[in-house]
Amino acid sequence: MKILVIGGTWFLGKRIAEGGLARGWSVTTFNRGRSGREVEGVTPVHGDRTDPDDLQRLSQQGPWDAVIDTSSSDFAPREVLQATTSLRTVVRRWVHVSTVSVYQGWPNQALTDSSPLLDCPADADASYGYTGEDGSPTLYGFQKAGGERAVTEVFGDSAVFLRPGVILGPGEYVGRLPWWLGRAKRGGRILAPAPSSQPIQPVDVRDVAEFALDQAAGDASGGFNVTHPDGITFADFLGECLAVTGSAGKPEWVDPGVLAEHGVAQWTELPLWRTHPGVWSVDSSRAQSAGLRCRPIAETIRDTWEWLAADGRPVDHPRWAAHGIAQEKEAKILASLV
């Protein structure tokens, strides 16, 4: 089996490259060579996916049985279309890492793999779409939906779309789970979003990587929601963070209305917290039937802490700084509750 990983040097792309090699496959990676390190054993090709000459040079390294594209989130649909068109003659199958944000109903409605998608042309530029007043839909969602359409127009039934919600695990660059672990370690009274019984559905990066590799080798087509089938309550999530860090911190579960009064930003200042009813109601039964296996989220939390404690250093990314409430703001809110 010969695969091309677009990306391949950090987080999901790195895990896919490592997993492909572990299966005895030939793995080529394509990236700009600016972030992370190449996995030992791959055939690296450096270039810009928006440059026709670089894509032409890449195509000369083929053919491949499959492409797994992990890096489309920063590119407009027409740039995805350019890449798929350039590589069509040297690739049999395209596995595209997308997002649940492509659905019209996310995050306000419960979703299945057949829920309707946002409408975006395959040749749209980066300006196409909009973000609604309540944060739904999003410009990002339109762009990713257009990327999916671009892949479909070129690869048809040889295209697979993986639609995760939140991916966590060792090597995370966004900073959601690392922030909660760091906050748990600091201890004291911890601002936490009520209700504590709210279930969440993040998936482990290693499980997404294995599923992507399975799809590269398979013959299925269409979209797969990649969310944890069991999930974990917010209380158990935070409890695991406290346990693995050896902290005596105490969560203070605060009503969302109170958090809103204090201007706490959902999704970022308290990572993974969002009040929209459908955000954690994404059905992944089709992916489970196709072989998705998700380890317990407690294992993801433990392994991420071990990675951080061993001086784990994620690739620098601007989204990291956007996550986590400032200590002064948290202290002010907690003081107001006394």
Image (spheres, rainbow, N blue to C red):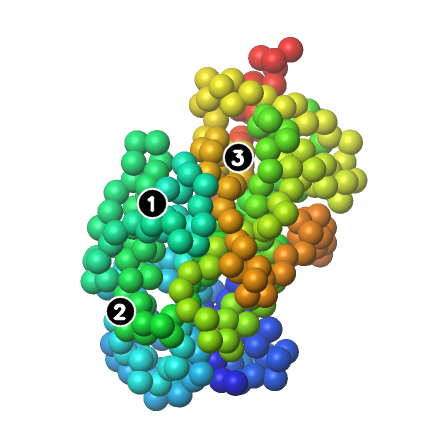
Question: What residue sits 40% from the left and 42% below the top?
Answer: 106
Which residue in the structure is indicated by mark 3? 273
Specify few, some or many for label 3: CA neighbours under 10 Å numbering under 14, 14-19, or 20 or more.
Answer: many
Q: CA distance from mark 1 to mark 3?
A: 20 Å
Which numbered circle lies on residue 153?
2
- Judging from the image, what secondary structure is the residue with disc 1 in? loop
Which residue in the structure is indicated by mark 1? 104
Given residues 195 and 205, the one toward you in this image is 195
Query: At which x and y percent is residue 169?
Result: 61, 54
Q: Earlier in the sequence, mark 1 or mark 3?
A: 1
Q: Amino acid at mark 1?
A: Gln
Mark 1 or mark 3, whichever is nearer to me:
1
Specify few, some or many for label 1: CA neighbours under 10 Å numbering under 14, 14-19, or 20 or more.
Answer: many
Question: What residue sits 42% from the left and 61% below the top?
Answer: 223
Query: At which x and y percent is residue 312?
Result: 64, 57
Q: Does residue 51 appear left or right of residue 160 in this picture?
A: left
Q: Amino acid at mark 3?
A: Trp
| Residue 329 vertical position relative to residue 68 in the rendered view, above or below | above
Query: At which x and y percent is residue 8?
Result: 49, 70
Given residues 217 and 38, the one toward you in this image is 217
Q: Does residue 276 appear left or right of residue 183 in this picture?
A: left
Q: CA distance from mark 1 to mark 2?
A: 20 Å
Question: What residue sits 59% from the left and 65% below the top?
Answer: 291
Q: CA distance from mark 2 to mark 3?
A: 36 Å
Q: Earlier in the sequence, mark 2 or mark 3?
A: 2
Quarter of the figure with the C terminus: top right
